Image (cartoon, rainbow, N blue to C red):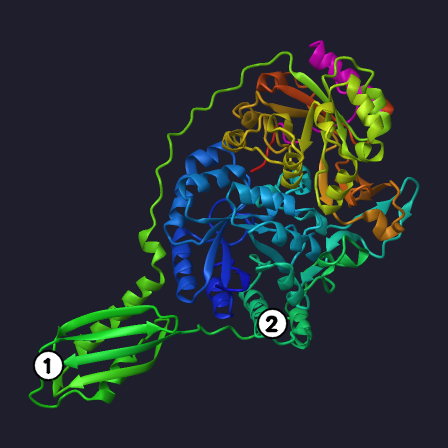
């Protein structure tokens, strides 16, 4: 078994072959549907079959990215046949984000591995354990995770760990970014990110602009772990993933070759540092953003992570040679005895054996075959991927060996060897799926429950004045700051304790200091926004019927809802990216619909306040101004070291009477950065529209988000 895996990107079939020739242990690529790089030149099924076959011939694995969120129609019309075609082509694993896809693979293709994509935002050992229990074989860690956090996954699970070692970084936790989607309709969760993080922004506090040293305050440098490989391996990383399915073959193959060289030094017990340092400049020449960073492997955040003065991926124009195909080495044994069938056996260094027989050998009347001529004929492997290095020839007597027969024998043996080395593609079959479900429009619910979620003490005070509120959702920062006050509040108000959007080790430690067994009964419900947070609640004994999945645990489709329902969960939150028509056919009776919020566009480990003002553990009201003079509020959460960027104006569908036609069991007002006066205005509008049934004009400038347009 391999001790490690160099995992290389393949934007097309030629690049796949190049990175395999350069030494990749595995490749990942996108098909013509459902991949997180919708604008890459993705693989047709014909290309994929050839690529998978090529990888297997050279001892490499092949993985398909199916790491986007899917809608009902996409699942019904395409998903099963799509997965089946790649599965039967010999694929080694699917890389997955959507729980509906996860569940379908586990149900109908149980033999194949499922890798939990970095889009699932697994940022601690907790989420990794949850996904392992569901049947994942590998977790692709969030790029923000430190080596210490990765090591904890290794210590607490049996999962393979895949970590990005080189290439572009997202400033937002992958899977938690809605910025491209909300601002331009191109969803990162659907593989169409427009990269608003690479645009210029000015940073402002309440009074003036802050000096930053550059305008690209959301644009991270590229990651480079060439000097961290040994420590990563010791921390439990198995697969070292190179980012770059949109990059050239020159980039992908040469980066792969460099990491191959340095990893081999480690595996052979030598010190890799000198070699890594030698290759560092070559990696810079191949492409970088104002240099490289390996900050996340060692620290939570820092200004040195950011490129600041340029967002572009630059290279020096270095043009390195392409990598010739590495031939598969074979040894051969040929036997020809008069009166018996001639035969040829081929053997790989790993012991794979092919054996074929030809026609019965006749005695030569003149010019008998000679050993040197036979060897010359058998070595002619032509344009195949094989080279015959050693040949043993056993000729008994004067034998007649027709050239045509020798050539055919060689071709048959090589073809059999190809079948042996690619055996999985010949035997796989898949179960037949159940009949497609019929989707009914939701029935109107005139009196849904009302949930109001708060982030500040002022908000909590204002909201508690409205008797028609059924549940008050209390964010983690209030609970961690003054747990006894929150417990006292929950005695008189049905309350939901909300966990952070990202639940890393720091959040786990903070909650462990505060959480009491009695809290299981003090709160009416608990809300998880990540797989890490979800497993934490389960580990504390919270029953599944008391857990609500927030909008970031995505339930785009009825099939995703079914997958979670089968696990025992009963309360969900609709995602922001579905439009009214798509929501109409989503089963909503056990879900909450957010009807007001400042939409959180990004959740970041990066801290704008720390980067440009210093870390003083204080809440700061900053904003990012774009090139259109629109300002995006940024809130730092020092309780768990997390930052959130919000949209410039609030989202609201309170004023839309058709909301009740969507059949949601509850509606939610989500307060984050508002002051008391703003909350009163929103609460009054909601009361008039949703409680009293009156037509209202929303009191402030707002957006309806994706309620009308949706995402592609």
Q: Residue 199: x percent and y percent?
A: 73, 50
Q: In this rendering, would 210 be left or right of 556? A: right
Residue 422 in the image: x percent, y percent? 35, 60
For the residue pair 132 and 325, the one nearer the viewer reads as 132
Residue that lies at the very extreme toward the front in this rendered image: 517
Q: CA distance from mark 2 to mark 1?
A: 54 Å
In this picture, residue 539 sits left or right of residue 626: left
State the residue position of label 2. 266
> From the viewer's perspective, is residue 279 above or below residue 304?
below
Label 1 Cα crowd, 10 Å radius (few <14 / some 14-19 / many 20+): some
Relative to 327, is 320 on the left or the right?
A: right
Which residue is tagged 1?
338
Residue 678 horizontal/vertical position (percent): 83, 24
Q: Is residue 441 above or below residue 139?
A: above
Residue that extends furthest to the left in the rendered view of this protein: 365
Q: Quadrant of residue 479?
A: top right
Number of marks in the rendered image: 2
User: Splitting the image into 4 quarters, where does residue 242 fall?
Assistant: bottom right
Mark 2 or mark 1: name the one nearer the start of the chain.
Answer: 2
Position of the C terminus, as image quadrant, is top right
Q: Is residue 679 magenta?
A: yes
Quick check: can you spot residue 674?
no
Q: Which residues are magenta?
A: 678-707
Give the residue displayed 59% in from the left and 70% down from the top.
Answer: 263
Nearer to the camera, 38 or 449: 449
């Amino acid at each position: 078994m391999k001790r490690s895996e160099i995992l290389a990107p393949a934007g097309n079939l030629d690049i796949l072959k190049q990175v395999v020739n350069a030494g990749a242990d595995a490749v990942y690529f996108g098909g013509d549907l459902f991949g997180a790089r919708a604008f890459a030149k993705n693989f047709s099924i014909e290309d994929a079959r050839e690529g998978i076959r090529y990888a297997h011939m050279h001892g490499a694995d092949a993985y398909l990215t199916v790491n986007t969120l899917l809608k009902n129609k996409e699942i019904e019309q395409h998903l099963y046949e799509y997965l089946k075609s790649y599965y039967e082509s010999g694929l080694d694993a699917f890389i997955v984000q959507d729980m509906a896809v996860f569940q379908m693979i586990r149900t109908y293709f149980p033999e194949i591995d499922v890798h939990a994509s970095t889009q699932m935002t697994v940022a601690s050992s907790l989420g990794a354990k949850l996904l392992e229990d569901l049947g994942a074989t590998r977790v692709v860690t969030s790029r923000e995770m430190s080596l210490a956090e990765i090591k904890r996954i290794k210590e607490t699970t049996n999962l393979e760990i895949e970590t990005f070692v080189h290439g572009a970084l997202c400033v937002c936790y992958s899977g938690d970014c809605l910025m491209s989607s909300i601002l331009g309709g191109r969803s990162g969760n659907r593989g169409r990110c427009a990269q608003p993080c690479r645009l210029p922004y000015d940073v402002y506090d309440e009074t003036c602009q802050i000096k930053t040293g550059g305008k690209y305050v959301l644009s991270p440098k590229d990651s480079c772990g060439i000097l961290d490989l040994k420590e990563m391996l010791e921390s439990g990383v198995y697969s070292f993933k190179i980012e770059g399915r949109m990059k050239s073959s020159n980039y992908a193959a040469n980066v792969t070759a460099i990491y191959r060289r340095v990893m081999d030094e480690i595996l052979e017990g030598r010190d890799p540092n000198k070699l890594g340092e030698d290759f560092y400049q070559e990696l810079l020449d191949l492409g970088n953003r104002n240099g490289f960073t390996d900050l996340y492997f060692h620290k939570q955040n820092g200004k040195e992570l950011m490129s600041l003065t340029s967002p572009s991926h630059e290279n020096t124009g270095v043009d390195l040679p392409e990598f010739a195909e590495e031939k598969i080495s074979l040894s051969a044994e040929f036997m020809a005895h008069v009166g018996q069938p001639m035969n040829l056996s081929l053997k790989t260094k790993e012991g794979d054996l092919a054996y074929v027989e030809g026609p019965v050998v006749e005695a030569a009347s003149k010019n008998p075959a000679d050993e040197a001529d036979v060897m010359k004929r058998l070595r002619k492997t032509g344009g195949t991927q094989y080279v015959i290095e050693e040949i043993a020839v056993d000729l008994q007597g004067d034998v007649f060996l027709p050239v045509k027969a020798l050539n055919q024998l060689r071709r048959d043996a090589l073809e059999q060897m190809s079948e042996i080395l690619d055996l999985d593609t010949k035997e796989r079959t898949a179960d037949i799926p159940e009949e497609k479900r019929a989707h009914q429009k939701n029935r109107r619910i005139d009196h849904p429950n009302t949930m109001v979620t708060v982030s500040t003490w002022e908000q909590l005070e204002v909201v508690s004045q409205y008797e028609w509120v059924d549940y008050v959702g209390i964010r983690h920062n209030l609970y961690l700051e003054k747990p006894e006050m929150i417990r006292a509040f929950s005695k008189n108000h049905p309350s939901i304790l909300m966990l952070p959007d990202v639940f890393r080790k720091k959040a786990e430690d903070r909650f462990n200091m505060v959480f009491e067994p009695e809290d299981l009964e003090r709160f009416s419900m608990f809300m998880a926004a990540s797989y890490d947070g979800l497993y934490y609640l389960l580990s504390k004994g919270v029953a599944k019927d008391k857990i609500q999945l927030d909008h970031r645990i995505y339930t785009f489709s009825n099939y995703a809802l079914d997958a979670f329902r089968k696990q025992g969960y009963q309360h969900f939150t609709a995602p922001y990216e579905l439009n009214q028509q798509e929501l109409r056919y989503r089963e909503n009776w056990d879900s909450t619909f957010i009807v007001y919020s400042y939409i959180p566009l990004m959740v970041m480990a990066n801290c704008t306040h720390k980067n440009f003002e210093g870390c003083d553990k204080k809440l700061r009201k900053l904003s990012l101004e774009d090139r259109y003079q629109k300002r995006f509020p940024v809130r730092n959460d020092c309780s768990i070291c997390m930052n959130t960027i919000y949209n410039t104006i609030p989202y609201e569908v309170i004023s839309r009477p058709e909301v009740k036609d969507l059949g949601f069991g509850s509606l939610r007002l989500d307060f984050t950065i508002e002051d008391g006066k703003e909350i009163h205005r929103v609460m009054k509008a909601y009361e008039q529209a949703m409680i009293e049934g009156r037509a209202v004009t929303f009191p402030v400038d707002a957006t309806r988000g994706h309620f009308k347009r949706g995402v592609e």
